[in-house]
Image: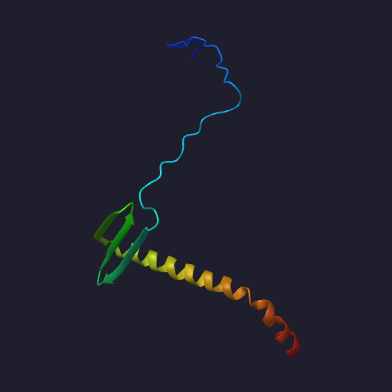
Amino acid sequence: MSSHPVKRKSRPVRVLEGDVVDVPAPIVKGNTAFSFRYSYAEFSAVGNSAQLRARHARYEDGKLTTESFEGDLDPRIYERVMNDAQRFFADQTALYLRAFSSFLLPFYKDRE
């Protein structure tokens, strides 16, 4: 593409007086002293179907917003989610217990 359909005219460079640039102040929202968020999700499997129920609530800027939904899932998705959750829990537990393994090594060396 050697020819461009639109050409821009050259403009002179603007010179600002000094290095001072006005930065806009952030907008202060009303009553930001109190806010909260709440989330809840429940998976359940009955027979050949899996269900998901979720609720979300939040209070921000003096406004309470809630959402809730329910849906049916493929049982394979339920199994995958449960396996991932169990693996995550086991990995976190192993990581936590690994911190104490250095305290147990002297006891095993004494028995040998």
Residue farthest toward the bottom in the current orientation of the protein: 111
Residue at x-position 47% and y-position 34%: 24
Quadrant for the C terminus, please.
bottom right
Q: Nearer the viewer, residue 30 or 86?
A: 30
Q: Quadrant of residue 66?
A: bottom left
Is residue 107 in view?
A: yes
Q: Is residue 13 left or right of residue 71?
A: right
Percent position of residue 26, x then y: 44, 41
Side (left or right) of 101 relative to 72: right
Q: Residue visible at 68% across and 80% down?
A: 103
Q: Is residue 112 visible?
A: no
Location of residue 94 (image quadrant): bottom right
Q: Position of residue 20 (x, y in %)?
A: 57, 28
Taking the spot 53% from the left edge, 70% from the top edge, the residue there is 92
Callout count: 0
Q: How is the image coloured?
A: rainbow
Does 95 sit left or right of 51 as displayed? right
- What residue lies at 55% left-to-right and 16% top-to-bottom? 14
Q: In the image, residue 34 lies at what x, y percent?
A: 38, 58
Seen in the picture, residue 27 relative to 93 is either above or below; the reply is above
